[in-house]
Image: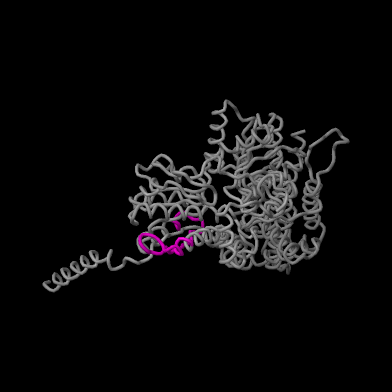
Amino acid sequence: MQSVTRRTVLAASMAAFALSAAPHAFAAEPIKIGLVTALSGQSALAGEALTRGMTIAIEEINAKGGLLGGRKLELVRRDDEGNPAKGVTAARELIYKEKVAVLFGGLDTPVSVAIVQMTNQEKVPFMGPWAAGTPITKNGAKVNYAFRVSAVDEIVDKAMLSYSQKTFKAAKPGLILVNNAWGESNEQGIVAALAAKGMKPAGIEKFEANDVDVVPQLTRLKAAGADTLFMVGNVGPSAQVVKSLDRMGWKVPVVSHWGPAGGRFTELAGPNAKNVHFVQTYSFFGKQSPVGDKVVKALKAKYPDIKDVDDITPAVGVANAYDGMQLVAQAIAKAGSTNGDAVREGFYKIDRYEGLIKTYVKPFSPQEHDALGENDYVWAYFNNDYILPVGMASR
Amino acid sequence: MLLLSALVSGLGLGSMYGLMALGFHVTYAVSGTVNFAQGSSMMLGAVLTFALARGLGWPLALAICAALLLCALYGLLVEFFAVRPFASRGSDAWLMSTVALGIVLDNVVMFSFGKEPRSLPSPLAQTPIDFSTLGLEGLGIYPLQLVIPLVGLALAWALHFVARRTRWGTAMLAVVQNRDAARLMGIPIRRVVAAAFALSTLFAGVAGVLIAPLVNVHADMGTLFGLKAFAVAILGGISSAWGVMIAGLLFGIVEASVTATLGSGYTQIITFSLVIVALAARPNGLFGRAEVRKV
């Protein structure tokens, strides 16, 4: 009994010593940055794109001497397999075991929504470089630790409307949406965006991800006088819509969320794939800013499989992750520590960052946790297998 | 015009359901068991054709034949591993094991083929038929959509012919009527049952090959199809070959016309409710006969 007590006292005093010594003894220890995304399966390429964007940014920061007086950044990755439960487990491990200062999410909205619940509780800042679900950053938490450098459903819906009005003089858009939560949330967003301009959709049609034939839905939108189509769906279902339009011989402008960018859209949808205009946050094609040139050069030097800009794919993942990582570094620098609360406040203190996607001026505030807005989107289309900005005929 | 287009579309889909339901019918008739994972067999037909034609560059016709042959072989495996061990001991566990085998197959395909949807082009689904001379513009029908119901009906007729007019068919019917008597007459029951399973996955494979150019080829393309095909098999009366085929066509047409008139949000609600109503009125299916249970 006595010895147990003695051992406990000893252990406690050692722990106290270790704690008090920690900040001094390990001043040069790296700052760990976590990434939880799909690294295997269908979305492995997307996970790799995020990794590359973050890695280029981290190497740049480390080459300049790191952060907080010489501490280097270190990337720690975990696979979520696109599964919310696995994502939360991985995030927990990164927070408790690896003690990451900031956690990056991946491309699946359900995974990010689940992780954000936990990071808010644990007071760990979260950076979303891909998933567009509105509730990731608008999560209702009193003290919100979730930030994002990516498209946001709600804003994409507004952007689809203004783009279609500007480019196609759309007056009566018809909605063709995949019948799931993603389609549902965009239906609300689009209807709200239309209502804000005193407009109404010509019709709202849903289709199943496995629908063989979307001709009936499209025929009804046509009969209702739709002059443009707003499409929300992953690459497979989106291709079914394009094929059905082709069969009907209906040549109508299609403005889409970024679903088509997620796969072999041209192979699936056929020659008319090129008529679909969809949202992106960045394109490495065309004239680049000095930051763009620098990032492309660094990517080519680091990854031998990148021979030209079309090998930087998906571009959205690389670009968002690069800017996201740079903004996180600024927030940590402003915070002067890796304390979660301080870093969260640090985000609000960022004045100006000349980034890849744009020059960010006061990108975050307690009311605004999304760094990209409607005017930051790029509209793109498929030219064979390349995603080019609209208006660019060839690479 | 909308309804005409829906009709063609519905007939095409309906004959797919019918073909897969015929697969349920043949095995049920001879053995009282079915391969619940018909959807996976259908997917196998499409994926194998894709892999052979696009992956290995075989001519399409050869790829289709090889894929169908492999589908039939898969049917033998289903019978040997997932049905016989249980059915021979009077257990109903084949219900579960055929579903399980289908899930295994789906996931094996996901691993090897990938989760990314792919496209299998067909010369019959490139340009829509031009009906403008008939005053029907924008009808939007590929030649393949007309071929599909023809193949479906031809196979149903062939099955009917084989069952009534050939020695194999007679043997099958004998097994259906009285297993023990058939065995005493020297009919190899095991082989007849195995052949029925091969035929069943072959039908599903044909459905997969036919539908593939109209949809995207991926590992879970068959799941919903398989479910609908089973509903169709029960609706038609699983013991009647023509019954399940006609029920398939009906189901397809109702589905397409509901989508065309009310919208796809209502399709599943209305079609499946109609199935329930129909079965309440005719518990043995539209064309089925009540089983006489001898005690």
Quick check: A382 above or below A19?
Answer: above
- Image quarter of residue B283: top right
The magenta stretch spans residue B268: no
The magenta stretch spans residue A66: yes
| Residue A181 placement, left or right of A32 | right
Residues B284 and B148: in front is B148
Total marks shown come to: 0
User: Furthest residue to the right?
Assistant: B133
State the scheme by which the image is colored: one colour
Position in image of residue A185 (x %, y %): 52, 39
| Residue A125 placement, left or right of A159 | left
Q: Please state, as top left, top right, bottom left or bottom right, where the N terminus of chain A lies in the image.
A: bottom left
Position in image of residue B18 (x %, y %): 71, 49
| Residue B230 placement, left or right of B10 | left
Magenta range is: A60-87
Position in image of residue A94 (x %, y %): 39, 61
- Image quarter of residue B267: top right
Position in image of residue A213 (x %, y %): 70, 43
Q: Which residue lies at the image location 45% right of the left edge and 46% below the top edge?
A: A136
- Image quarter of residue A73: bottom left
Quick check: B215 above or below A161?
Answer: below
User: Furthest residue to the bottom?
Assistant: A3
Q: Is residue B161 visible?
A: yes
Q: Is residue B34 visible?
A: no
Residues A302 and B21: in front is A302
User: Furthest residue to the left?
Assistant: A2
Quick check: A310 above or below A174?
Answer: below
